[in-house]
């Protein structure tokens, strides 16, 4: 159980376009989903926390207007990278917390999305 | 500022031997620590965790030790197997008001298990 999927797994887009990444909890309902970004050989950096039905909370330094997060249901959160630029190229990972278990430290991670902006 | 630090970016160990991965943290409000394993182009998978009220937790080949006074934890893998080759992330969670449920990750340690 506790499977999180991400789609797409890889995406290449042109500079200036927008890209949407989906994160789904497949066999549980997620009260909270987190979006991370990982640069090569670096740590996972938390970008934002997304609670179902409310606005996302962004970490310091993360542009809200650039990284739009929507958490419309208990099983789906989306991250839209708007007007993407090459420096947005990265590995984006989502995680989800199970509503029923709801232990604050338990997060189930998706497989990640590799975004390349040309 | 990096509140969770893994100072060894890589570790090479022979199959069958012990792998010891280290992690240091600076925030005394952290009260729960986790280790994740990550393969390239995949999301992290949970390995083992420890609460700050304990100093040791064991699960099969994996043991995590916590030294609160030193703000240090370590992950022991014994015996190491080729399938253990991956990046290992240390993560911490705290009760800080604006950080509930969030994980702070270290930079990771690449483990390579050689035959």
Image: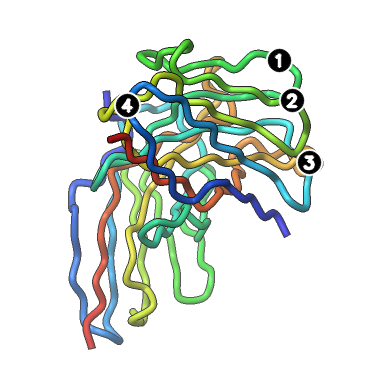
Between disc 4 and disc 1, the foreground one is: 4
- Residue B4 vs B84, above or below: the answer is above
- The CA span between labels 2 and 3 is 12 Å
Quarter the C terminus of chain A occupies: top left
Residue B78, percent from left and from top:
37, 78
The residue pinned by badge 2 equals A72
Between disc 2 and disc 1, the foreground one is: 2
Q: Are marks 3 and 4 on the same chain?
A: yes
The residue pinned by badge 1 equals A54
Residue toward you, B38 or A17: A17
- Residue B79 vs A84, above or below: the answer is below
Bin the neighbour count of mark 4 within 10 Å (Cα to Cα): few under 14, some 14-19, many 20 and up. some
- The CA span between labels 2 and 4 is 27 Å
Residue B49, percent from left and from top:
52, 53
Bin the neighbour count of mark 1 within 10 Å (Cα to Cα): few under 14, some 14-19, many 20 and up. few
Quarter the N terminus of chain A occupies: bottom right
Q: Residue at x 46, y 32 (%)?
A: B30
| Residue B80 can be seen in this image | yes
Between disc 2 and disc 3, the foreground one is: 2
The residue pinned by badge 3 equals A29
Judged from the image, the secondary structure of the residue bearing numbered disc 1 is loop
- The CA span between labels 2 and 1 is 8 Å
């Amino acid at each position: 159980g506790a499977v999180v999927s991400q789609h797409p797994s890889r995406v290449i887009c042109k500079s200036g376009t927008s890209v949407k990444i989906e994160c789904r909890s497949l066999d549980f309902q997620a009260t909270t989903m987190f979006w991370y970004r990982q640069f090569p050989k670096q740590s996972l950096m938390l970008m934002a926390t997304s609670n179902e039905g409310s606005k996302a909370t962004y970490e310091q330094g993360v542009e809200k207007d650039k990284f739009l997060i929507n958490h419309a249901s208990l099983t789906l959160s989306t991250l839209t990278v708007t007007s993407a630029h090459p420096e947005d190229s990265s590995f984006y990972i989502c995680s989800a917390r199970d509503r029923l278990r709801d232990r604050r430290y338990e997060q189930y991670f998706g497989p990640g999305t590799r975004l390349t902006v040309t | 500022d990096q509140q969770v630090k893994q100072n060894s970016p890589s570790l090479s160990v022979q199959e069958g031997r012990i792998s010891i991965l280290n992690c240091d943290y600076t925030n005394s409000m952290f009260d729960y620590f986790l280790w994740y394993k990550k393969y390239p182009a995949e999301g992290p998978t949970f390995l083992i965790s420890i609460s700050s009220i304990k100093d040791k937790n064991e699960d099969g080949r994996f043991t995590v030790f916590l030294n609160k006074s030193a703000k240090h934890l370590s992950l022991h893998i014994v015996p190491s197997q080729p399938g253990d080759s991956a990046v290992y992330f240390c993560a911490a969670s705290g009760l800080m008001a604006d950080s509930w449920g969030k994980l702070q990750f270290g930079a990771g340690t690449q483990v390579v298990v050689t035959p």
